[in-house]
Image (cartoon, rainbow, N blue to C red):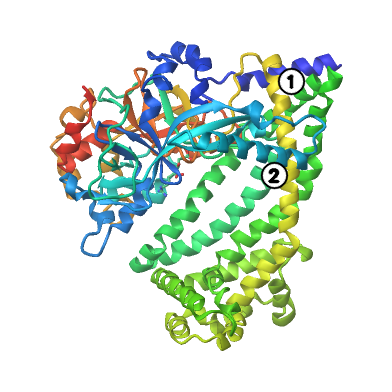
Amino acid sequence: MKKLSLTFAIIFVMSSVIRADEGMWIPALLQRNEAEMQAMGMKITADDIYSINHSSMKDAVVLFGGGCTGELVSEQGLLLTNHHCGYGWIQRHSTVEHDYLTEGFWAMTQDEELPCPGLTAKMMRNMVDVTDKVLAGVTDATTDEEREKVIKENIDNIVKSVENDTEYAVTVESFYQGNQYFLIYNEIFRDTRMVGAPPSNIGKFGGDTDNWVWPRHTGDFSVFRIYVDKDGKPAEYNEDNVPYNPDYHFTISLKGVEEGDFTFVFGYPARTNEYLPSVAVNQEANVIYPVVVDLRTQILDIYNKYQEKDAKVRIQYASKHAGLGNGWKKWMGVIEGIRNFKGIEKKQAFEAAYNDWCMQERRRMKYMHALRDFTPVYEEYEKYRMASTYLNEAGLSVELIKFAANFNKLSTVDKDTPQEDIDKIINNLRGTTASFFKDYYQPIDEEVAVAMFEAYRANQPEDFRPGILNEIDSKYKGDVKAYVGYLFGKSIFTSEDKVNALLDDFKPGKAKKLAKDPALVAYNSMLDFYNENVKDKTIECNKKINNLRRVYMEGQMKMIPEVYPERNLYPDANFTLRVTYGKVGGFKPKDAVTYRHYTTLDGIMQKENPDIYDYVVTDRLRELYEAKDFGRYADKDGSMHVAFIAGNHTTGGNSGSPILNAEGELLGLNFDRTWEGTMSDLVYDPSICKNISVDIRYVLFLIDKYAGCRRLIEEMTIDE
Ligand code: ARG
Ligand code: GLU
């Protein structure tokens, strides 16, 4: 009987195991993938991609700012990333006179390139396996608590021992849930300047409507440049700094892509959870995400209603809408994908095989226990996760309450607080206040507040309701509207004048009254509730889960090579540099529908609608289109290709990553995935998981023909 179920499980899982496109590989270990990559069409070697002995492609890829990837494309530090990655900087440099978001920005000379203080570019220079050193002193008998302590000490010692002998910043990062550790050397560039960006109706074409969607027509790129001091070393911004001459920069290919072409993506994926047990995936996709999606649907519907009515409100809520909408759409894709592609069932089948493997030897029992022990922990965790979810997604979606939270510090000063400190708090609050009211529309917020408190009350059990919800019951007989009327009627935080008057004339004697403002009371009721009833339990559950995940991962690392020898293991994304590879190709998202692998400028013209903000096309782009003035950037079919999809396993953080061809030449910039495949963060399915890239030829066409910024084209290395 046992035997039978094992065979069954293996056959069931096999179909989902041979999936060449899956995996985010550690560049230092890429030798292991070389044969497969070459069999898929790659013409270069793993050593060309990653080497510490000579310059290689890794010297041309950076972590751009805090969460994106960028790549170097010239000997003068020219860097490409996405428009949505440069967005904050484009916005910061914009004024009413020079609205670069709307008009685009092009530095026609190097002098015009704009400093971006605080923007870093981090380049990984070396990574060394230090697992043995990190785990020194840890045995099977070590308790989880001791383990944490020992590891922390070991890591501190490793960092200390190398810190002084290197010009680079060093960190130790955990892979495979704490089963492997790498010491990583990073070079951090601190003078990165803004060079160019297309107007938003190109760089964000399709906006949130098209976000996560294929077919896509977004020119999602922007251009920056890294500067260094005269010795070629990273330095803070200085007028005298010079363009950085990197060890490597990508050659650009104008050849485009065809169905079946080999590609790889080199970048900084942030987080995936591919090795979770089915109970966890189930909780994520079937319990938590549906709640978040439902709450956000209600909020976004309210935003939409008012945004459609009023152009000013549309702009005020554009970025808030984008922020909520991005996760909302992605998680809908995860929920559907997990259901349609049987994510839970595949995990369960794998777990059956895993258990069978554990049963074969006594010393594998701990691995079986780890898997089994997840269930009660996740059961307990669910209540607390739900509590946090309602707190964050419902309670704190009321802008008034979130804004009021900033005043908590001020509401607790007293006559002993030094005036200097009070002045500092007040100064900060002035900025916060101005930017809050610039984009605040009270009717939206009131409606959101009613919807969110209703949902909060209706869906959280009594012992998981912050005091403020009980007050709605006791004081307002459960009438949420009446409470919200009181909240917005009484709070000073609805009025910029009142808030400014408070700041202008603040005295410690006023703190007590401030603390009684109903918005602040609501916030503190939620905060107290979290601190008293949720926080510690959440930390405790997380600790347990992380320890179980470590052991379960270790078990999987032993079992998979034995039971599925063809399956190559890779660690979850952890914001370190990775390589992923796959082939260009369309897909079938649902019955009767087939997607081609590329889009063209024709599609932009089809989508054009001067009345819909996301689909406005500038006269200049239309003229170029009508004149078919694409120069050498046209495809051999004569059209202008805009974007394409391929089977690369990417996630958030891969935005801006170079997508490269068999020769390692730049084909485009990764910027998104198709929403049908967003479950790839939890379970990968090659038939549906596709990454979306903007075609480099469209990027160059825009720089050259549209913006006329020839000097940038001239410094690039272009293979016609
Ligand atoms: N979905 C992409 C990502 O996760 C792009 C987001 C920015 N674009 C947008 N239209 N909101 O970051
Ligand atoms: N747009 C995402 C980013 O900013 C990439 C899309 C994804 O999640 O794959 O990193």
Q: Secondary structure at mark 2?
A: helix
Q: Using the image, tell me which numbered label, if any, was put on residue 174.
A: none
Q: Mark 1 is on which residue type?
A: Ala
- Residue ID at (64%, 43%): 285
- Disc 2: which residue: 283
717 sits left or right of 490 in the view: left
**504 w.r.t. 459: above or below:** below
- Residue ID at (28%, 57%): 93
Q: Mark 2 is on which residue type?
A: Gln
710 sits left or right of 125 in the view: left
Q: Nearer the viewer, residue 699 or 554?
A: 554
Query: Quick one: label 1 or label 2, which is nearer the N terminus?
Result: 1
Q: Using the image, tell me which numbered label, if any, was put on residue 9.
A: 1
- Mark 1 CB within 8 Å of ligand 2: no
- Residue 538 at x, y percent in the picture: 72, 52
**376 w.r.t. 471: above or below:** above
- Residue ID at (63%, 77%): 521
244 sits left or right of 396 in the view: left
